[in-house]
Amino acid sequence: MTSARTGSATAHRRGVSGWSARTIIAVMVVVFVLFFAVPIVWLLLATTKSARALSVGNPFAVGSAGDLSTNWSQLFGFQDGAVTTWMTNSASYALGALVITLVVSIPAGYALALTRFRFRRLLLVLTLIVMLIPNTALVLPIFLELNAVGLIGSPLSVILPMSFFPFGVYLTYIYFSTSIPRDLLAAARIDGCREIQVFTRIALPLAAPIVALVAFFSFVQNWNNFFLPFVMLPSSDGYPVQVGLTSLLASTPAFNPSSAGGQSVQLPTLALATVVSVLPVLIVFLVSQRFLVAGMTAGGTKE
Amino acid sequence: MTLVDRTARAAAVATRRPPARPPATRDSLLSYGLISGYAVLTLAFGLLPALYAVYLAFTDATGGFAGLANFTKAVGDFRFWPAVSHVALYLIIWLVALVLLVTVLAVIVHAIRVRWLSRTLRFVFYLPGALAGASSVLLWLFVLDPTASPVGGLLRLFGFDSFVQVILPGNLPVIFAVIAFWTGAGGWIVIMYGALNNISAEVIEAARVDGANAVQIAWRIQLPMLRKWIAYMSMMSLAAGTQLFVEPQLLSQASNAVVPNDYSLNQLAYQYAFQQNDFNTAAAISLLLLVVALALSAVFVTRGGLFERE
């Protein structure tokens, strides 16, 4: 196996032959690196500029700390600190749903993987199907349902639907059915563990990696969710930041000329709002990048 | 849902192992206790809303049986077929770009033997996935506004001097496809890269010994092995794409309704529910979209065997 690997590595090295082919590939890679990276780099730079510098200056010039702080105070002064409210809302919705998701999904994944009960197969198939549906597909039906029971406008109307996270249950199910040796559980039973203790003392302590993975996906998805809160929460006080961005956008004269007035938002401020709105996710992304990419491709590599 | 999360789901399901048989313990109260929370949520936010939408779609405002009246009303709406064609056009452009470019980029990144370079490229492609929904649309509003854009010169070169010119209705499907590609392609490139790693080195080596060059290897060996992943990517993207909502909604707001607020099907359903207070027709449209998503998902789940290892 080792010799085959080395052999293939050398073979790959002379893989793409000819200068013209190499050049075409190099150009293509550069073009796509620019396509993916330039908007992000530019956005970060834009937050440090004044509105004037943004429209007339070199797009890739660095602005000044002074302009950044002006933009910052304009953003957080918008509608008497609405942005702070939205960020707090986002955090409480995303974390509230995250906690419920973990409390519900980890035991469910364990039960599906390692115990027997009626409807187990049905629940598994349902889980698979629902997790493959785009979750926007159920937003209007859930709205109609919650409207019928009078929950619209309450934080619960976003937290509860977001806590339903079949993908998390599925990941946990896969983890418990492949990574926990059955002998270990059997040994615990022989040693006199009751069933509940097998779960709390043996399985749970081993579940740390899957808890982290489910928490990551749940948090990112909840934080970025737009359609659900957009539909459920009519009042600005309840907006998460993703929905709040639409208010900022509506107050930006550059895009919406009718909004020119006392509360108008300048372009660099809107750029800063965009950055602030994704900052928590971006940080989580950067911190967990390695483990995430490994996790995403874990299934795709040979054991 | 974020595209990152979606691609991860794809990976999780496509590589799923045959379900493990649980140990032969008796039905126990404990199992029901452990599963109860999730079962309640599944009922409340999976099954019940779907059933309630079915009920609403087939009844009128007073609760009487309406037959197909809501569906014929929705389909007969003068905005319905334009919305279908907008979404269809966007999907075609997006899917073609996705299939071609993701495959080519994954093969290229995989062929790069310099480790740090390959890893950095994957990361750069993948990072935009952190910006989902409204944030990425907002970012692209900047990029598409010639007065602010970092590529303003490029836009003017193509004759776009103002934001309104850029977002003319004819350009929208391309714009939405670009935004979707920008946020989502990286996740798929990472997954395809993983799949390419899976092709045994011996097979590639044998082809090389037989005189195949890099292009022939990509075309004859790597591509056929990626086929199932490409099929899966297309199906999941198709299901997600029919749900188009955030992008046209924000553009409509940003452009002062130059982009109409009933551009996509989901927006039309939203208009029915919130502007016209017609929940029955809104439910009918949501149900049509839900059926499309369910069908795609069910095909994938039941034909999962397609993805098991040989």
Image (cartoon, coloured by chain):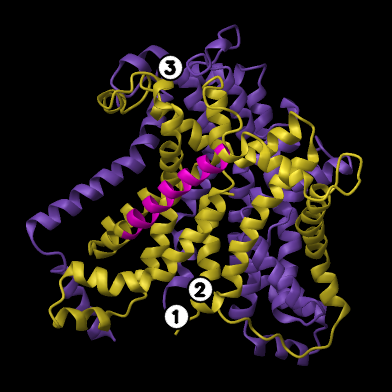
Chain colours: A purple, B yellow
- Mark 1 surroundings within 10 Å by alpha-carbon count, few (fewer than 14), some (14 through 19), many (20 or more): few
Distance from label 3 to label 2 (Cα)? 49 Å
Q: Main secondary structure of the magenta part?
A: helix
Distance from label 1 to label 3 (Cα)? 52 Å
Image quarter hosting the C terminus of chain B: bottom left
Of mark 1 and mark 3, the one earlier in the sequence is: 3
Chain at numbered mark 1: A
The residue indicated by pointer 2 is B15
Residue B216 shown in magenta = no
Query: Pointer 3 and pointer 2: residues touching (CB < 8 Å)?
Result: no
Q: Name the residue: 66% across, 90% down.
A: A183
The residue indicated by pointer 3 is A67
Observer-side mark, 1 or 3, equals 1
What's the amino acid at mark 2?
Thr
The residue indicated by pointer 1 is A303
In front of the other: A195 or A250: A250
Q: Name the residue: 79% across, 35% down.
A: B278
In front of the other: A165 or A96: A165
What's the amino acid at mark 1?
Glu
Q: Which residues are magenta?
A: B82-103
Query: Pointer 1 and pointer 3: residues touching (CB < 8 Å)?
Result: no
Query: Is B48 drawn above or below residue A54 in the view shown?
Result: below
